[in-house]
Image: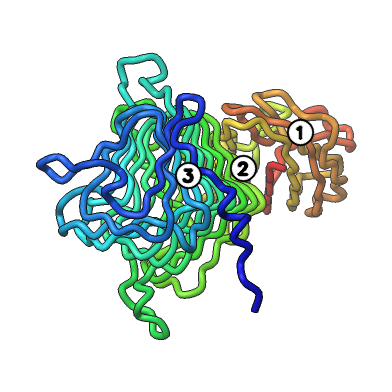
Amino acid sequence: MSERNPGVFSSIVFTPTINSTNMVEVSQESDFGVPDMSGVITPDPNTAYFVRGNVNCTNRLDISNPNVAIVGWDRDVDGLTYTGAAGAGDFITVTDVNFQLANLKLSSTNSTGGDVVLRAVNYNQADYNAGRNKVLTVINCQFRNCFDVWHIEGFDLVDIQNTLVWYVQATTMGCHFKNVSKLQISSCEYVRWFDETSIPTPSGYATAAMVELLNNAGGSGFGAVNISGSIFHPQQTQKGIAISNSATIGFGTISANTGIDIGLTTGAVTSIDYDIQNSTIIQANQGLINGNAKGTLSIIGNLNDLDTGTTNPQVLAEANINTGGFTNTPTFPFPVRVTTSVPNCSFTYNNKNNGNFFVVITGTVEMSGDGFIACRVRSNGTPITSSIGYPEIRQGRAQNFSFSVLGSAVIGDVFDVEFESFNTGGTSTPNDILVREFVLNGYQF
């Protein structure tokens, strides 16, 4: 075995201050400073703390001075383990300053619900951009062997990259976010949320959601959210990504993530109401349904005529049926990001992202005598004439028909269907149309 070359290491000189930035090597907790009477250490401003190996901390760290970073070289070797008393409070608090964690392992033995490893706040509703003018960055870290993980509110940008959050036993909160102006989670892993010491028979499962976007509570909400390229494996009652129905998102994208559902009981890979979170694009994820608007209108076994003899063409709607309305009530299976009207047989596009759509219609129609029946999709009361259904009726016999339509939509656009009868038997008055069976399938792409 060859020996180290001592000349390589003897040539390294640690300079404590460069360009007005202090650099401090941390091999023990006291390198962060002296705790106050309540057991809180406030690291110095304009200082990068370089952690070497694992450092046990019995006191809490208050990051309230500007330009502080805590970094390591290897997240498997360098880290901070909080061993403070249960109920003592959060390990690291960040208040209204830029802050970075990098290349570190963060652990905590504090099992008290609500006490987190990291609590960071940069938010004041009354100020411009709600006072969110700082950046919080977590790069290439791991949060391992801890209970409640973090609560982050505000900040102009919260950037979580290449970070592994595992062997977590959270009971109150996993990774909470609230009122963040721009939130970026990329290439992260949220897996194995149970007690690592219980392997090979896992137990001590976390019960909190892994990533949770909270109720705004009257605040500014989320300006933009991007969750991409990450892995979520909730188990038992856990949820992977949970977005409150009361969390508002201006612009959101959830894409290229992998959700794993093995081991779930009452939990879920995601808990998102697509109709409420209708500004968020959800595409190309494993375990998450794409967030395209879609819907089906189904009419089965109708025996009452559409009154095209009085108004021709006539919109397919309850009010325009001659006697007693539809024999069976129209249904709208699978509506997503659309609102539906049973009496009007209509869809309203409820997606804040403009989209193209593809509609396929099939049906069975009939009328007295000979003639043709035209079926058209309407957009905001205007027929789309590029494609129509046009079955020919002979001797009053029922005819099947089908056709498809391409179009575009913006939020609030209303789509319905009209029918028009054309007699060929010499009768001047249009015949009423019986729409016996009708199915419309529409999908945004």
Mark 2 or mark 3: name the one nearer the start of the chain.
Answer: 3
Q: To which residue does mark 1 refer?
A: 407
Residue shown at 64% from the left, 27% from the top = 410
Query: Eyeballing the image, is 251 above or below 30?
Result: above
Tell me where residue 338 sits by quadrant.
top right
Mark 1 or mark 3: name the one nearer the start of the chain.
Answer: 3
Of circles 2 and 1, the one toward us is 2
Of circles 1 and 3, the one toward us is 3
Q: Rate crowding at label 1 as few (under 14), some (14 to 19) or many (20 or more) other CA atoms within 10 Å.
A: few
The answer for how far apart the CA atoms under marks 2 and 3 are is 35 Å
Query: Could you tell me if the residues under marks 1 and 3 are in contact, i.e. CB atoms within 8 Å?
Result: no
Mark 2 or mark 1: name the one nearer the start of the chain.
Answer: 2
The N terminus - image quarter: bottom right
Q: To which residue does mark 2 refer?
A: 293
Left or right side of 73 for 68: left
Q: To which residue does mark 3 refer?
A: 138
Give amino acid for label 2.
Ala
Q: Rate crowding at label 2 as few (under 14), some (14 to 19) or many (20 or more) other CA atoms within 10 Å.
A: many
Whole-percent x and y of residue 296? 62, 49
Give amino acid for label 3.
Val
Residue 229 in view here: yes
Q: Nearer the viewer, residue 33 or 115?
A: 33
Q: Which element carries disc 3, helix, strand or loop?
A: strand
Whole-percent x and y of residue 346? 59, 37
Q: Which element carries disc 1, helix, strand or loop?
A: strand
Residue 328 in view here: no
Whole-percent x and y of residue 73? 52, 53
Residue shown at 59% from the left, 37% from the top = 347
Give amino acid for label 1.
Gly
Residue shown at 23% from the left, 60% from the top = 83
Whole-percent x and y of residue 321? 59, 38
